[in-house]
Amino acid sequence: MGRLSTHVLDNANGKPARGIAIELFAIEGEGRRSVLRTITNADGRTDAPLMIGEAFRTGTYELVFDVGSYFKALVVPTADPPFLDIVPIRFTIAEPDGHYHVPLLVTPWSYSTYRGS
């Protein structure tokens, strides 16, 4: 059964990023449709997969992470306005039975991602 998951690591503070708002969009033609909104837990993960089972479909998607609010709440020194505020990651699901794990490693000044397992 295919599924999509994510987690966020705060590389500036060396810990999971709790409380980051995430929105998942399905990209449809020139537009996008909101699929779900969630927030990371104490482990920097979501409490459930973002998509699983029948909801998991091939296509192009975008995860949008609100990292600006997260670092502002931690009172981490950043630029004003912050250099990174909203971080979008656009990716494609091609394997209908695959596990797609899209983590975000972030600081106020940089981010990276990869296809995890």
Image: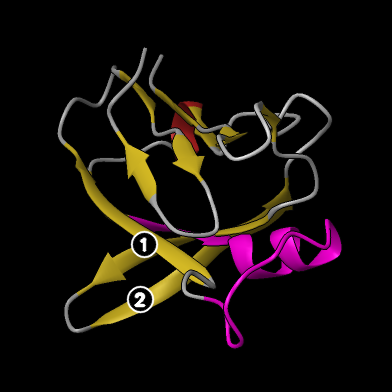
Give the image quarter of residue 60.
bottom left
- In the displayed structure, 87 sits above or below 44; it is below
Residue 3: x, y in percent?
44, 25
Q: Earlier in the sequence, mark 1 or mark 2?
A: 1
The front one of 95 and 105 is 105
In this picture, is 81 found above or below 68?
A: below
Q: Which mark is residue 26?
A: 1
Q: Is residue 46 magenta?
A: no
Distance between the Cα atoms at labels 1 and 2?
5 Å
Q: Residue furthest front?
A: 77
Q: Is residue 105 above or below residue 68?
A: above
Left/right placement of residue 111 relative to residue 78 reads left
**68 falls in the magenta region:** yes
Image quadrant where one finds the N terminus? top left
> Which numbered tag is attached to residue 65?
none
Along the line of sight, the residue nearer the viewer: 38 or 16: 16
Looking at numbered disc 1 in the image, what kind of residue is underneath it? Answer: Ala
Q: Residue at x 44, y 63 (%)?
A: 87
Which residue is at a point 83% across and 56% down the rendered structure image?
74
**Marks 1,2: beta carbons within 8 A:** yes
Residue found 69% across the figure and 65% down from its top: 77
What amino acid is at disc 2? Answer: Arg
Report the colour scheme: secondary structure
* Pointer 2 local density, CA inside 10 Å: few below 14, some 14–19, many at least 20: some
Query: Pointer 2: what residue?
Result: 32
Examine the rendered structure and indicate whether residue 83 appears above or below residue 36: below
Segment tinted magenta in the rendering: 62-82
Query: x and y percent of residue 42 in the render?
Result: 84, 29
